[in-house]
Image (tube, rainbow, N blue to C red):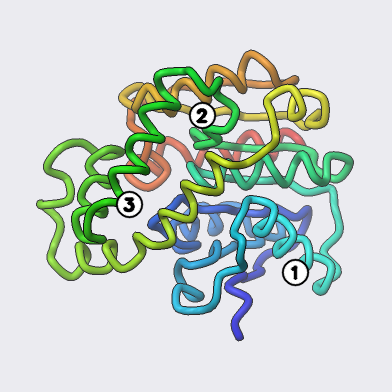
Amino acid sequence: MSTGIEVSGSGPVVILLHSSLSSKEQWKPLIKQLSPRFTCVNVDLQGYGSIANEGILSPYSLKCEVERIQQFLQQKALSGPYYLVGHSFGGAVALRFADAFKQQVKALCIFEPVAFHLLDGNAPQRQKVSELAVNMDNITDYEGAALFTNYWNGEGYFSALPKPIQQGLAAMMPKVALDFEAIINEPKTVQEYANSISANVLLMTGEQSRSSAKAVVAVIEDNLRHVTKIEINGGHMAPLMQSSLVNPLIMDYLCSHI
C-alpha cells in the first residue's frame, strides 16, 4: 500500500498538510520554492489523493493522522526540528501535531485551521458548523458536495464546475463527514494548546472568509504564544486560489525561522 506521502528537497523538515476535498497536489507550487532549502514531506491525508481508495483508520481522529505522519517520519529517519504548513483541515492536524510533539516543532504556518473544537460550544459559529455537518448527513453526496463547496467558496461555485469535477468531489464526501467528526469531537481545548504549543506561528486568514473560520483564527491569536497574524485579500481557499499571495508569506516565514 502507498503511504500517500512524498519526500523531496534537503534541509530542515517541513510537513505540508492540505485541506479537505484536496490532496498533496495543492502544495506542489510551494514545494518548488521550498525544496532547495527544506526537506518537504508532502502528505495525502487519509481518504484523499493517492490514497483516496485505501482504508481509513477507525475511529478516525486528528490523532490518527498525527500518529500516521510520525510513524512515517520515524521510518524515514526524518528528525526534528519540524516545520508545519497546514490549510483548513490540514491546519487543524498541524495544531494537533504541534501539541503532541511540542519539543520538536519550531514553527507553524497555518491558514484558517478549522479547529472548531477550540470554540465555545455555545458560540454561534460553532453551532453553524455543527448544523452544516448535520445537514450534509441528511442529503446525497452530490448535494453535500454542493453545500460544502458553496459554503467555503460562495453560492453558485459548485454548479459552475465541470461535471467530472463535481462527481469527483461528491465521491469524497464520506471522508469530509469524517473530517467534520474529527474536528468537532477533538477533546483538546484551547487552553491545552496554549500551554503546550510554544512554536512560532504564522496565522493567515482571508478578508472574505466565513465567520466560523475567522472565529477560530481569533481564538488562536488570543491564546497561543508567538503568533504573527496576516490577513490577505482572499477567502478560505486562498492557498489554492491566491497561492501567489500565500506561498511567498510561508516561504519568507519559514526561512526566517531556520
Residues at marks 1 and 3, CA–CA distance in whole angstroms: 33 Å
Quarter containing the N terminus: bottom right
Q: How many marks?
A: 3
**Mark sitting earlier along the chain (2/1):** 1
Q: Comparing marks 1 and 3, which lies closer to the viewer?
A: 3
Q: Is residue 242 left or right of residue 175?
A: left
Please name the amino acid that badge 1 sits on.
Answer: Phe
Residues at marks 3 and 2, CA–CA distance in whole angstroms: 30 Å
Residue 137 is labelled as: 3
* Helix, strand or loop at mark 1: helix
Using the image, determine if residue 89 lies above or below residue 77: above
Q: Position of residue 170 (x, y in %)?
A: 26, 63
Foreground of the two, 108 or 88: 88
* Helix, strand or loop at mark 3: helix
* Helix, strand or loop at mark 2: strand
Residues at marks 2 and 1, CA–CA distance in whole angstroms: 27 Å
| Residue at numbered disc 1 | 72
Residue at left offset 50%, top offset 53%: 18
Residue at left offset 34%, top offset 60%: 173
Using the image, determine if residue 27 lies above or below residue 54: above
**Mark sitting earlier along the chain (1/3):** 1
| Residue at numbered disc 2 | 204
Quarter containing the C terminus: top right
Residue 99 visible, this angle: yes
Residue at left offset 79%, top offset 39%: 106
In this view, the residue farthest toward the bottom is: 1
Q: Comparing marks 2 and 1, which lies closer to the viewer?
A: 1
